[in-house]
Amino acid sequence: MSLRRRRLVALGLLSAGALVTLGAVLLPYRPVIVSGAQPPPGPYPMPAAVAGLRLHVFNTGMNRMSALLVGEHRPWRPAPAFVIEHPREGLIVFDCGLSTSVAREGESALPVPMRWLFESRGREGRTLDAQMREAGLEPARARWVIISHLHDDHIGAAASFEGATFIGGQGTAGKVLGLSAPRWREVDFHDTRALPPFDASLDLFGDGSVVLLRGGGHAREDVMALLALPGGPVLLTGDAVVHREWLHSDNVERVAVDSQRAADVRNQVRALLVARPDVTLLPGHELQGAPGSRGDVTLHHPEWFKAEAWPLSH
């Protein structure tokens, strides 16, 4: 790259950084309080447990949001990914965690504007595909990959699953790796049934083992997954529930594309957890409370679930 070109690029980055700083000054953070609609009251029957269904829990790094989006309280939070062992369908991945590029370069590997809106840290050798191989779960064996939404911290290792069929919400086909039908299946919840307290659901394999649920607040394509594990149901939310602090507040923050829908989904999850305390919640960026003493759930390197295990700034 020529010197003139490098200077232009540098000026462009400075200008972009200045715009972010200016935005923080002109648009100081304020809570976005939305009460949301209340779901119908329980009880809420759950699908019957499926023998042989297992869940593997991994952490692929740490993220920290900009104060412009979430205010001054912005701790480092994990970037988890999950692998489901199905007795008939084999390996199913739910979200792919951070990429090798982020592991090497941090948030500078992310596209604009994401690199300005949050910090992201990983380590080479700790991406989802690397951890799966270490655990004896060969990525090439994955038959299905469920993408909760298209943000980079949830699709980082997607290229490791080229032999799988990808499943995502409406409008996601072709957005990851350029995949298209029949290797990509979009879920259109408009013609699906409610599974109270949730207003739309899809029994992915017809046996109740993996039921997809409509989100749509954090990102328009949000998909959650309810797993009928033998030891009790587990709800994987992606960023439809970012973390428990978010769940217990009426503040949907500035990260939601649809604040009203985000609040509606939040209320659905709240109602489920009140009526069904046997449901284990695994949010999009929190691993506290992940069950470590169940035979149907395996936590891989739980010491990596903590911020201290990663190269973080302060």
Image (tube, grey):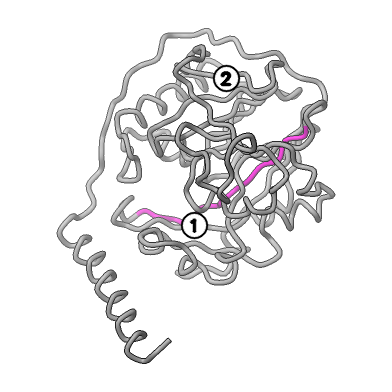
| Vertical side of 41 occupied by 289: above or below | below
| Vertical side of 191 occupied by 63: above or below | below
Q: Position of residue 132 (x, y in %)?
A: 76, 51
Question: In terms of secondary structure, where does tag 1 sit?
Answer: strand
Q: Nearer the viewer, mark 2 or mark 1?
A: 2
Which residue, as the protein is rendered here, is positioned at the far left?
26
Figure quadrant of the N terminus: bottom left
Q: Is residue 194 left or right of residue 246?
A: right
Give the residue type at disc 1.
Asn
Q: Position of residue 80 (x, y in %)?
A: 60, 48
Q: Circle 1 is placed at which residue position?
A: 63
| Vertical side of 175 occupied by 311: above or below | below
Q: Is residue 93 left or right of residue 89?
A: left
Residue at image coords 32%, 33%: 250
**Residue 245 counted in the magenta span:** no
The quarter of the displayed image where residue 268 is located: top left
Give the residue type at disc 2.
Leu
Question: In terms of secondary structure, where does tag 2 sit?
Answer: strand
**Residue 82 counted in the magenta span:** yes
Please tell me which of labels 2 and 1 falls first in the chain.
Answer: 1
Disc 2 to disc 1, C-alpha distance: 30 Å
Q: Circle 2 is placed at which residue position?
A: 202
Q: Position of residue 142 (x, y in %)?
A: 75, 41
Is most of the magenta stretch helix, strand or loop?
Answer: strand
Q: Which residues fall within the magenta stretch?
A: 73-85
Figure quadrant of the C terminus: bottom left
Residue at image coords 46%, 36%: 241
